[in-house]
Amino acid sequence: MCAAADIPPGETRGFAAEGERPALMAVHDRSEGLRIFVNACPHMGVPLDWMPGRFLNADGTRIICATHGAEFRIGDGYCVRGPCRGESLKPVPARIIDGIAVINLNGDLTPPTP
């Protein structure tokens, strides 16, 4: 989970589901809202970030793979340029509940009961 307000429009964050390296990445698409993807290039499975939590190209219009230079659309993770052209980043279901991005890797977005 992360606070949706911690990721302003046009910004990205990496965070770990398990392990040390951020396993997931979140990007706030200006038109579509918060999107969350697995932090792995479909070409070889390498992490995308070129610096911790940094996933976008210089002008902030595409997610970029630091290893291969592949470029992905922010809204849907579709690769438009690079060795994995035509493939997509793996999306992670998320829902904003009381200002918190709730992520469940099993696909269940039902809020926990108190």
Image (cartoon, rainbow, N blue to C red):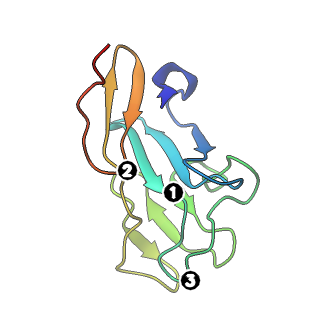
Badge 1 element: strand
Q: Earlier in the sequence, mark 2 or mark 3?
A: 3
Q: Position of residue 93 (x, y in %)?
A: 31, 46
Q: Quadrant of residue 29?
A: top left
Task: Give the distance between the C-alpha atoms of the residues marked 2 and 3, in whole angstroms.
Answer: 21 Å
Q: Which residue is located at x 61 percent, y 64 percent? A: 48
Q: Which residue is located at x 28 percent, y 25 percent? A: 111
Q: Is residue 3 above or below residue 55?
A: above
Q: Nearer the viewer, mark 1 or mark 3?
A: 3
Q: Earlier in the sequence, mark 2 or mark 1?
A: 1
Q: Nearer the viewer, mark 2 or mark 3?
A: 2
Q: Position of residue 1 (x, y in %)?
A: 48, 32
Residue kind at label 3, given as amino acid type: Met
- 13 sits left or right of 80 in the view: right
Q: Which residue is located at x 55 percent, y 76 percent? A: 45
How crowded pointer 1 is (Cα within 10 Å; few <14, some 14-19, many 20+) is rated as: many
- 48 sits left or right of 5 in the view: right
Q: Name the residue that disc number 2 marks.
A: 105
Q: Name the residue that disc number 3 marks.
A: 44
Q: Residue extending furthest front?
A: 114
User: What is the number of the mark on residue 8?
Assistant: none
Q: How many callouts does the rendering have?
A: 3
User: What is the number of the mark on residue 62?
Assistant: 1
Badge 2 element: loop
Q: Nearer the viewer, mark 2 or mark 1?
A: 2
Pick whichever, 91 or 16, lies toward us. 16
The reply to whether callout 2 and callout 3 are in contact (CB within 8 Å) is no
